[in-house]
Image: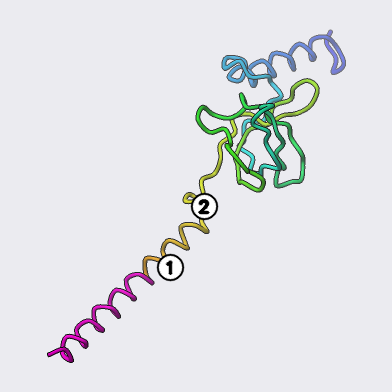
Amino acid sequence: MRTKEGAGSAATRARAADKVNAPERALGAPPDERRTPVQGKMLWFNEAKNFGFIRTEEGERLYVHRDGFLPGDAPVGRCAGVAVTFNVSSGEPERKAVDVVIVREEDSPEARARAAVLAIAKEAVGEVVKQEIERMKGRVP
């Protein structure tokens, strides 16, 4: 006879957990790895030592190794305050950032808004310049 505290219920819970965690295990990821991308900012990154730290939007400070960046996306030069997205993985001795992607300035909503305003300003200035040229053409003999 099985009870709530019995081995049968523990085995059932274990089988259910295996089904839930199967995709992560198939990808080689630890079952406690966070799969939802997190946003944060680089605190610093030492190119010579190949590691640094990221602060999440929640304020947590996470270790990041050069291998934690997607290929070709590791920071070069000063990177303090650079926006990044990443996943969080529990590792020894602490949680760390993995699959880190630097958010390009041109991809941010603020950058797109600035680009739109700049395009409108260029168009307006272009019209003013054209009008001024036409006005000046009338004055020159």
Q: Secondary structure at mark 2?
A: loop
- In this rendering, the answer to whether 23 lies above or below 45 is above
Which secondary structure class fits the magenta region best? helix
Q: CA distance from mark 1 to mark 2?
A: 15 Å
Q: Residue at x 49, y 57 (%)?
A: 111
Asked if the magenta segment contains residue 56, the reply would be: no
Q: Is residue 4 left or right of residue 34?
A: right
Q: What residue do we see at 52% from left, 52% from top?
A: 108
Q: Mark 2 = which residue?
A: 108
Which residue position holds label 1? 117
Q: Which sits in the foreground, 20 or 135?
A: 135
Quarter of the picture holding the C terminus:
bottom left
Question: SS class of the residue under badge 1?
Answer: helix
Please identify the quadrant where the N terminus is shown: top right
Q: Amino acid at mark 1?
A: Val
Q: Nearer the viewer, residue 22 or 3?
A: 22
Position of residue 26 measured from the top left corner of the image (x, y, whole percent):
57, 14
Report the magenta residues as a range.
Answer: 121-141
Farthest residue toward the front? 141
Q: Quadrant for residue 96, please give it.
A: top right
Give the vertical position of 127 relative to 92 (above or below).
below
Q: Residue 136's mark?
A: none
Residue 116 in percent (x, y) is at 41, 64
In the rendered image, residue 88, in percent from the top left (x then y), is placed at 68, 31
The residue lying at 62 percent from left, 31 percent from top is: 35
48 up-or-down from 108: above or below: above
Judge from the rendering whether residue 41 lies leftward or rightward of residue 118; answer left or right: right
Label 1 environment density (alpha carbons within 10 Å; few <14, some 14–19, many ≥20)? few
Task: Say whether residue 138 is magenta.
Answer: yes
Binning the other alpha carbons within 10 Å of mark 2 as few (below 14), some (14 to 19) or many (20 upward) gives: few
Q: Mark 2: which amino acid?
A: Ser
Mark 1 or mark 2: name the one nearer the start of the chain.
2
